[in-house]
Amino acid sequence: MTEQIVTKNLKFEYEQEDEQKVLVIKDMNIKINKGEFVAILGHNGSGKSTLAKHFNAILLPTQGAVFVDGIDTCTPNQLFNIRKKVGMVFQNPDNQIVATIVEEDVAFALENLGVEPKEIRKRVKEALESVEMYQFKDHAPHQLSGGQKQRVAIAGILAMRPECIVLDEPTAMLDPRGRKEVLDTIIDLNARYSTTVALITHYMDEAAKADRIIVVDHGEVIMEGKPSEVFSHVEKLKEIGLDVPQVTELCYNLRKEGIDIPDDIITEEECIQALEKLLQNA
């Protein structure tokens, strides 16, 4: 598979007011392939959001390197190309919405780039349709729900036609309905357009939908693999302050009680099938 984002011995530190330096990321090596849906997990302060900001050169390494399609993010004259390839969606959609009309907001960045008006209209329409928000094109963003606002923010990034979208806890401020709307949009974009997705989240059920999970703790990668592989390490995840999907914890507790049920279950359907099989063989 073709590599989209690569970090090599990445280190990042910041300076506090007392001039003490704090190392946030320690010698991190990860790869995200084109078309892959990767979830990045970690408790607050683990370094996951700092890592995400390196993917489109919002932050630059203190040591080591980050490559986007082979381009070193520290190359000064390549910043525009990097930002064009990797779009960023933040936790609070209000911080990304700048216009008073949905359609104008999605067009904002394209206008600043000097894209032809005809092309802007085409891209805005396609972007809003892809997140199922075209019917709201004439609405005021402040009248939308949290989930709808976040989908408009995603459309604004999609109109730029990036190959990769990095989402930093995009559902953290949303209710369950809004969370589902945004997650469904992310999954659809990845499946339908092969858009590379890097999702920073603390919701285990969201991470369970990814192709691969990377677990970060104290600025280091401590675990990675398919969701079923990562979530099978229930005790280790709990030790670092993370949870597992509810159905995975149920199966974990059943195994503790001596019930022979697989340790790689992450969906309700898998759990039902396993329990049915047990009952049939009882």
Image (cartoon, rainbow, N blue to C red):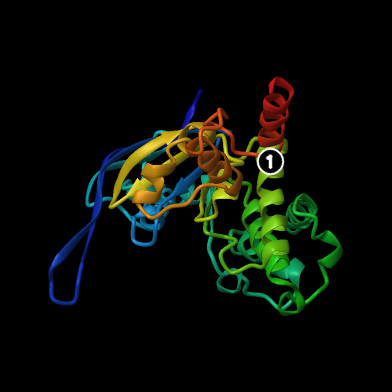
As helix, strand or loop, the secondary structure at mark 1 comes to: helix
Q: Which residue is pictured at 67% across the width and 75% down the height?
A: 99
Q: Nearer the viewer, residue 141 or 239?
A: 239
Task: Find residue 36 and report its image quarter.
Answer: top right
Query: Residue 87, position in %: x, y?
Result: 54, 52
Query: Residue 5, position in %: x, y?
Result: 43, 38
Q: In this rendering, does residue 164 appear at all?
A: no
Total count of labels = 1
Q: Which residue is pictured at 68% across the width and 41% down the height?
A: 268
Task: Find residue 65 and report its image quarter.
Answer: top left
Task: Find residue 31 and report its image quarter.
Answer: top left
Q: In this rendering, does residue 15 appear at all?
A: yes
Image quarter where the C terminus lies is top right
Furthest residue toward top: 281
Q: Residues within 10 Å of mark 1 (few under 14, many from 20)?
A: few
Relative to residue 75, is residue 107 drawn left or right? right
Residue at image mark 1: 268
Q: What's the amino acid at mark 1?
A: Glu
- Above or below 72: residue 281: above
Furthest residue toward right: 135
Relative to residue 71, is residue 226 drawn left or right? right
Q: Nearer the viewer, residue 134 or 267?
A: 267
Query: Residue 16, position in %: x, y?
Result: 19, 71
Query: Residue 18, position in %: x, y?
Result: 13, 76
- Above or below 45: residue 205: above
